Image (tube, grey):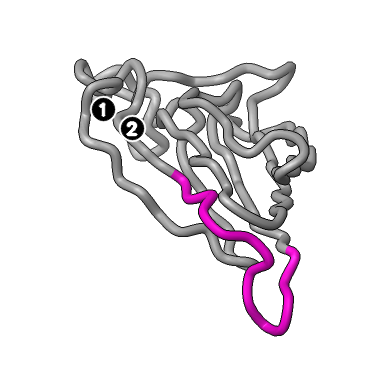
Amino acid sequence: EEVEEIFGFLVRYDMSGDVALAEHADAACVTLNVCLGPEKDGNEAFEGGELGFRGVRFQDADASTRPQTVIKHQVGVAMLHLGQHLHQATPITSGERENMIMWMTGNGGWVRVRPYVLQDGSWAESR
């Protein structure tokens, strides 16, 4: 029920265009982010461009002020995260990087931003 539609797109970072993406949350229940590369001689053809994550909007009262966790994005690696997880792409410092992004939503683009409450009967086990 929660994931019935998928919207996919490509993002490109390079020194002549966009080099970073400011902190934000996605219009999705869940986001899949796949680093497509490119590679050069078996290594990433870019420097920098890590992903920084903070808290989750609507769940963590201090989501935007939590310490940032930075993760190196590697070619061929996919990251799955909540759409409301605050995140950013730090600047690439050389080369280029392409990513495939897939936003997963409910029917008609519906996005759940709050966790289920066990007592409200919305968990599968309680139905």
Question: 40 or 125, which is in the foreground?
Answer: 40
Q: Position of residue 88 (x, y in %)?
A: 48, 34
- Badges 1 and 2: C-beta atoms under 8 Å apart? yes
Residue at x 30% of width, y 30% of height: 55
Relative vertical location of residue 114 with respect to residue 72 in this rendering, above or below: above
Q: Residue at x 41, y 31 (%)?
A: 85
Direction from residue 69 to residue 44 in the image, left or right: right
Magenta residues, start to end: 38-51
The circle drawn on residue 118 is 1
Which amino acid type is marked by label 2?
Ser
Screen quadrant of the C terminus: top left
Closer to the N terminus: mark 1 or mark 2?
1
Residue at left offset 71%, top offset 44%: 15
Q: What number of labels is visible?
A: 2
Q: Position of residue 122 (x, y in %)?
A: 39, 24
**Nearest to the observer: residue 14 or residue 2:** 14
* Left/right of residue 25 with respect to residue 106 in the rendered view: left
Which residue lies under the disc numbered 2? 126
Q: Is residue 71 covered in magenta?
A: no
Provide the secondary structure element on which disc 2 rests.
helix
Residue 78 in the image: x percent, y percent? 58, 59
